[in-house]
Amino acid sequence: MTSHSDISAYVTWALLVGVTLLSWFLGADHGGLFHSTMVAGAVILTLAFVKTALVGQYFMELRFAPMLLRSGFYLWCLLTLCIVLYLYTLA
Protein backbone atom coordinates (compact mmCIF):
# COMPACT_ATOMS: atom_id res chain seq x y z
CA MET A 1 0.00 0.00 0.00
CA THR A 2 1.36 3.39 -0.92
CA SER A 3 1.20 6.25 1.51
CA HIS A 4 -0.18 9.70 0.84
CA SER A 5 3.33 11.16 0.60
CA ASP A 6 4.28 8.59 -2.05
CA ILE A 7 1.25 9.52 -4.14
CA SER A 8 1.97 13.24 -3.83
CA ALA A 9 5.58 12.58 -4.88
CA TYR A 10 4.35 10.77 -7.99
CA VAL A 11 1.88 13.52 -8.81
CA THR A 12 4.58 16.16 -8.31
CA TRP A 13 7.01 14.21 -10.48
CA ALA A 14 4.38 13.91 -13.23
CA LEU A 15 3.68 17.64 -12.98
CA LEU A 16 7.41 18.40 -13.26
CA VAL A 17 7.67 16.20 -16.35
CA GLY A 18 4.62 17.91 -17.84
CA VAL A 19 6.04 21.39 -17.23
CA THR A 20 9.38 20.26 -18.71
CA LEU A 21 7.64 19.01 -21.84
CA LEU A 22 5.69 22.26 -22.09
CA SER A 23 8.94 24.23 -21.81
CA TRP A 24 10.50 22.10 -24.52
CA PHE A 25 7.43 22.56 -26.72
CA LEU A 26 7.57 26.33 -26.33
CA GLY A 27 11.35 26.54 -26.68
CA ALA A 28 11.55 24.37 -29.77
CA ASP A 29 9.02 26.67 -31.49
CA HIS A 30 6.65 23.83 -32.17
CA GLY A 31 3.47 25.51 -31.17
CA GLY A 32 3.75 28.93 -32.67
CA LEU A 33 1.68 29.91 -29.63
CA PHE A 34 3.63 33.13 -29.18
CA HIS A 35 4.61 35.34 -32.07
CA SER A 36 7.48 36.77 -30.07
CA THR A 37 10.45 34.71 -28.93
CA MET A 38 10.82 37.20 -26.06
CA VAL A 39 7.40 36.24 -24.66
CA ALA A 40 8.10 32.53 -25.14
CA GLY A 41 11.43 32.91 -23.34
CA ALA A 42 9.79 34.74 -20.45
CA VAL A 43 7.16 32.01 -20.12
CA ILE A 44 9.87 29.32 -20.16
CA LEU A 45 11.83 31.14 -17.44
CA THR A 46 8.67 31.46 -15.35
CA LEU A 47 7.97 27.75 -15.75
CA ALA A 48 11.52 27.01 -14.59
CA PHE A 49 10.88 28.90 -11.36
CA VAL A 50 7.55 27.13 -10.90
CA LYS A 51 9.50 23.87 -11.13
CA THR A 52 12.00 25.22 -8.58
CA ALA A 53 9.16 25.97 -6.16
CA LEU A 54 7.66 22.50 -6.66
CA VAL A 55 11.00 20.81 -6.02
CA GLY A 56 11.48 22.90 -2.90
CA GLN A 57 8.03 22.17 -1.60
CA TYR A 58 7.80 18.45 -2.25
CA PHE A 59 11.32 17.06 -2.54
CA MET A 60 13.13 19.34 -0.10
CA GLU A 61 10.25 18.94 2.37
CA LEU A 62 9.56 22.67 2.69
CA ARG A 63 5.84 21.96 2.99
CA PHE A 64 6.56 20.74 6.53
CA ALA A 65 9.00 23.54 7.34
CA PRO A 66 8.12 26.55 9.49
CA MET A 67 6.16 29.27 7.72
CA LEU A 68 9.06 31.73 7.88
CA LEU A 69 11.37 29.34 6.01
CA ARG A 70 8.74 28.54 3.38
CA SER A 71 7.94 32.22 2.91
CA GLY A 72 11.61 33.05 2.56
CA PHE A 73 12.07 30.37 -0.08
CA TYR A 74 9.07 31.51 -2.11
CA LEU A 75 10.12 35.14 -1.78
CA TRP A 76 13.59 34.19 -3.02
CA CYS A 77 12.02 32.38 -6.00
CA LEU A 78 9.83 35.38 -6.82
CA LEU A 79 12.58 37.98 -6.46
CA THR A 80 15.06 35.92 -8.45
CA LEU A 81 12.49 35.37 -11.19
CA CYS A 82 11.81 39.12 -11.36
CA ILE A 83 15.53 39.90 -11.60
CA VAL A 84 16.11 37.24 -14.26
CA LEU A 85 13.12 38.42 -16.30
CA TYR A 86 14.29 42.02 -16.03
CA LEU A 87 17.77 41.07 -17.23
CA TYR A 88 16.22 38.95 -19.99
CA THR A 89 14.27 41.93 -21.30
CA LEU A 90 17.46 44.00 -21.40
CA ALA A 91 19.22 41.45 -23.59
Image (cartoon, helix red, strand yellow):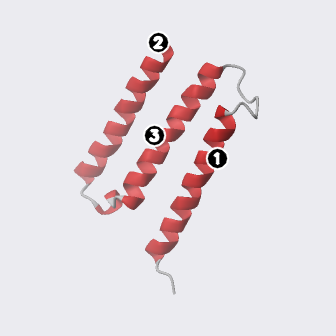
Residue 1 at what x, y percent from top left? Answer: 51, 87
Residue 37 at what x, y percent from top left? Answer: 64, 21
Displayed quadrant of residue 63: bottom left
Crowdedness near tag 1: few (<14), some (14–19) or many (≥20) residues, C-alpha within 10 Å: few
Q: Which residue is pictured at 42% across the width and 31% down the height?
A: 81
Q: Which residue is mark 1?
A: 21
Q: Amino acid at mark 1?
A: Leu
Say above or below: 5 vs 86.
Answer: below
Residue 88 circle label = none
Q: Is residue 50 left or right of residue 70?
A: right
Q: Are marks 1 and 3 in contact (CB under 8 Å)?
A: no
Q: Sequence order check: which comes first, mark 1 or mark 3?
A: 1
Q: Amino acid at mark 3?
A: Phe
Residue 90 circle label = 2
Crowdedness near tag 3: few (<14), some (14–19) or many (≥20) residues, C-alpha within 10 Å: some
Q: Amino acid at mark 2?
A: Leu
Viewer-nearest of discs 1 and 3: 1
Residue at mark 1 to residue at mark 3: CA–CA distance:
15 Å
Q: Is residue 36 left or right of residue 62?
A: right
Q: Which residue is mark 3?
A: 49
* Residue projecting furthest to the top: 90
Residue at mark 1 to residue at mark 2: CA–CA distance:
27 Å
Label 3 element class: helix
The count of marks equals 3
Label 2 element class: helix
Q: Sequence order check: which comes first, mark 1 or mark 2?
A: 1
Q: Which residue is pictured at 24% across the width and 50% down the height?
A: 69
Label 1 element class: helix
Q: Sequence order check: which comes first, mark 2 or mark 3?
A: 3
Residue at mark 2 to residue at mark 3: CA–CA distance:
19 Å
Q: Which residue is pictured at 57% across the width and 31% down the height?
A: 43
